[in-house]
Image (cartoon, rainbow, N blue to C red):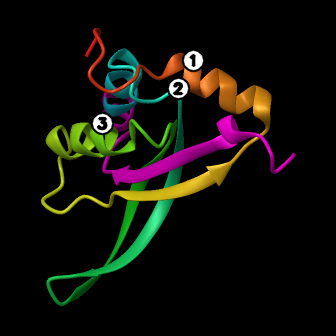
Amino acid sequence: MRDDLPDAALVQVTTTVASREAAGALARLALERRLAACVQVQPITSYYRWQGVVHEEAEWRLVCKTTPQASAALCELLRAHHGYELPQLVAQPLRASADYARWVHEEVAPPGSAGR
């Protein structure tokens, strides 16, 4: 990767849900609204403290690749359609190869564009 490629900046947004079906529904919605170019779904086991109790739960993690311009709208979409009272929404900046970043930018609609 070269540092002089301005289009190589991306954002990865992650969240977790309770079922494969919920993960698939959120993934398809993010793609249909053109807020993500790619969503990977992974089965995981989460350990966490919630309301004073330690839990161990099977969950599904969504890893969404998007643009910096669309990341806030993607987080809002995930929050609005999420089944959890307090969903995990984590956005991390990424550096990608120029070709991959270009593809993500082509697949994600600019904020305020038609198709949303």
Q: Position of residue 112 (x, y in %)?
A: 26, 22
Q: Is residue 60 magenta?
A: no
Q: Are marks 3 and 1 in contact (CB under 8 Å)?
A: no
Quickly name the residue at label 2: 37
SS at badge 3: helix
Quickly name the residue at label 1: 106
Quickly name the residue at label 3: 22
Comes first in the chain, label 2 or label 1: 2
Comes first in the chain, label 3 or label 2: 3
Q: Is residue 22 magenta?
A: yes
From the viewer's perspective, is the residue at label 2 or at label 1 nearer?
1
* Point 44% across, 52% down: residue: 14
SS at badge 2: loop
The kind of residue on which mark 3 rests is Ala
The residues bearing labels 2 and 1 have C-alpha atoms spaced at a distance of 8 Å
Is residue 30 depicted above or below 20 in this figure?
above
Rendered image quadrant of residue 7: top right
Closer to the camera in the image, 26 or 54: 26
Closer to the camera in the image, 78 or 46: 78
Q: Are marks 2 and 1 in contact (CB under 8 Å)?
A: yes
* Point 24% across, 37% down: residue: 77
| Magenta region | 1-25
The kind of residue on which mark 1 rests is Glu
Q: Residues within 10 Å of mark 3 (few under 14, many from 20)?
A: some
SS at badge 1: helix
From the viewer's perspective, is the residue at label 3 or at label 1 nearer?
1
Comes first in the chain, label 3 or label 1: 3
